């Protein structure tokens, strides 16, 4: 999979919008099949439903990925953000900055 392809909205298995309370947010996904996944989270500061970017494509709103994946040259690769869901319950922390 191309590194940016996993970020495509059309490839998302699930998507949610949740409110921030006391500096954090909790999002629950149910009935997710076991497998390998990556999570992207962002703070939609202006409420337009998307991660805004500047004129050269760099995100202008806080964002983060599972496993703390980051890249200096664009979005991280799927393999760097991927984790394996292998049990019915799992907690995953994603830091948005």
Image (cartoon, rainbow, N blue to C red):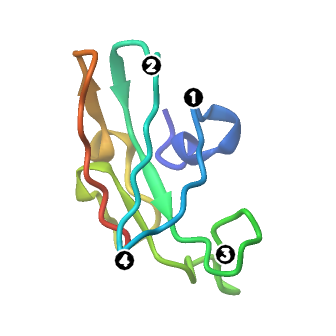
Q: CA distance from mark 1 to mark 4?
A: 23 Å
The circle drawn on residue 32 is 2
Which residue corresponds to mark 4? 97
Q: Mark 2: which secondary structure?
A: loop
**Do the CB atoms of the residues marked 4 and 3 lie less than 8 Å apart?**
no
**In this picture, residue 51 sits left or right of residue 23:** right
N-terminal label among 3 and 1:
1
**In this picture, residue 10 sits left or right of residue 2:** right
Neighbourhood count class around disc 4 (C-alpha, 10 Å): few under 14, some 14–19, many 20 upward: few
Neighbourhood count class around disc 3 (C-alpha, 10 Å): few under 14, some 14–19, many 20 upward: some
Q: CA distance from mark 1 to mark 2?
A: 8 Å
Residue at (77%, 70%) from the top-left corner?
48
N-terminal label among 1 and 2:
1
Foreground mark, 1 or 2, reads 2
N-terminal label among 2 and 4:
2
N-terminal label among 1 and 4:
1
Which residue corresponds to mark 1? 13
- Residue 55, above or below 43: below
Residue at (35%, 67%) from the top-left corner?
24
Residue at (57%, 42%) from the top-left corner?
5
**In this picture, residue 46 sits left or right of residue 32:** right
Please provide percent x and percent y for residue 45.
61, 80
Q: Mark 1: which secondary structure?
A: loop
Residue at (37%, 69%) from the top-left corner?
96
* Displayed quadrant of residue 38: top left
Q: CA distance from mark 3 to mark 2?
A: 28 Å
Q: CA distance from mark 2 to mark 4?
A: 26 Å
* Displayed quadrant of residue 39: top left
């Amino acid at each position: 999979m191309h590194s940016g392809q996993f970020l495509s909205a059309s490839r998302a298995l699930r998507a949610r919008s949740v409110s921030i309370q006391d500096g954090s947010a909790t999002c629950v996904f149910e009935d997710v099949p076991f497998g390998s996944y990556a999570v992207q989270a962002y703070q939609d500061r202006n409420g337009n439903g998307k991660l805004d970017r500047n004129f050269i494509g760099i995100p202008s709103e806080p964002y983060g990925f599972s496993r703390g994946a980051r890249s200096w040259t664009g979005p991280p690769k799927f393999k760097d953000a991927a984790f394996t869901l292998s049990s019915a319950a799992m907690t995953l922390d994603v830091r948005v900055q």
